[in-house]
């Protein structure tokens, strides 16, 4: 969803983790990290009822202006925040028909697919978003999580997170990724060392 926030307008989970220290425990390799979608400025603390009211208003706008891209993006984000991921995907699909090369919408659509457990679709869309925009670090962040936690592709996760650090070493999410990269390097290094030892026996 093309939210006006900056990998990267921050997700509530990440902000809460940083503020309370919970995020530190998420650095352990054996824990699942949450994926991140972009949050629209001013939306972070909206209660469910306010989001429901906005959904109704936006749907009314789209009745007379169905190709209103910003309205579609907002609606997709609101459905996402309500946990209605199927509807969110449907709206993002409409938005991408209007703006097919929008990497941010593609990224958020990928996150919605991941929330539904459709990891193959999610990976495909994250990679597509990165192809659209090589600086789409939010897609890199999330792709690494899906590869590591869902697909068990540790080399793939390491590669994409290193790419993230090359692009956004000063971003808040880099603080999370650096320990993950270190842990993956150590874990993969141990595997390589074990394989070498076995070959020499």
Image (spheres, rainbow, N blue to C red):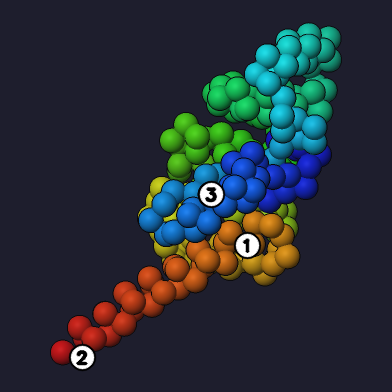
Under tag 3, what secondary structure? helix
> Gap between marks 2 and 1, in whole Å?
39 Å
Which of 124 and 53 lies nearest the eye of the viewer? 53
Which quadrant is home to the C terminus?
A: bottom left
Residue positioned 31% across, 82% down in the render: 193
Label 1 vs label 3, nearer the camera: 3
Secondary structure type for disc 1: helix
Which residue in the protein does label 1 denote? 175
State the image coordinates of residue 61 (x, y, percent, origin top left).
82, 12
Is tag 2's residue or tag 3's residue first in the polypeptide sequence?
A: 3
Q: Residue 85 occupies which quadrant of the picture?
A: top right
Task: State left or right for residue 186 relative to residue 10.
Answer: left
Residue 65 at x, y percent in the picture: 83, 15
Q: CA distance from mark 2 to mark 3?
A: 43 Å
For this view, does 180 lie left or right of residue 18? left
Q: Nearer the viewer, mark 2 or mark 1?
A: 1
Q: Quadrant of residue 112?
A: top right
User: Residue at (45%, 42%) from the top-left corner?
Assistant: 119
Q: Is residue 132 visible?
A: no
In the rendered structure, the answer to whether residue 9 lies left or right of residue 114 reads: right
User: Where 26 sits versus 155, above or below?
Assistant: above
Does the image show residue 191? yes
Residue tagged 2: 200
**Labels 1 and 3: the sequence-earlier one:** 3
Q: CA distance from mark 1 to mark 3?
A: 14 Å
Estimate how packed mark 3 is, as few (under 14), some (14 to 19) or many (20 or more) residues with alpha carbons within 10 Å. Answer: some
Q: Earlier in the sequence, mark 2 or mark 1?
A: 1
Judge depth for marks 2 and 3 and give the one in front. 3
Q: What residue sits right under mark 3 in the picture?
A: 22
């Amino acid at each position: 969803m093309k939210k006006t926030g900056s990998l990267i307008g921050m997700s509530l989970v990440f902000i809460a983790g940083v503020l309370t220290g919970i995020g530190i425990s998420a650095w352990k390799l054996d824990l699942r990290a949450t994926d991140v979608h972009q949050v629209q400025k001013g939306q972070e603390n909206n209660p469910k009822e306010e989001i429901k009211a906005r959904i109704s208003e936006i749907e009314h706008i789209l009745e007379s202006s169905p190709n209103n891209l910003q309205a579609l993006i907002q609606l997709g984000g609101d459905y996402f925040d309500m946990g209605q991921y199927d509807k969110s995907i449907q709206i993002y699909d409409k938005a991408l028909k209007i703006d097919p090369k929008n990497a941010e919408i593609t990224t958020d659509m990928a996150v919605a697919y991941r929330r539904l457990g459709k990891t193959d679709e999610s990976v495909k869309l994250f990679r597509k978003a990165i192809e659209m925009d090589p600086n789409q670090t939010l897609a890199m962040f999330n792709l690494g999580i899906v590869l590591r936690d869902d697909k068990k592709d540790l080399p793939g996760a390491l590669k994409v997170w290193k790419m993230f650090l090359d692009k956004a070493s000063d971003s808040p999410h880099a603080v999370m990724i650096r320990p993950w990269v270190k842990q993956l390097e150590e874990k993969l290094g141990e595997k390589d060392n074990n394989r070498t030892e076995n070959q020499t026996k």
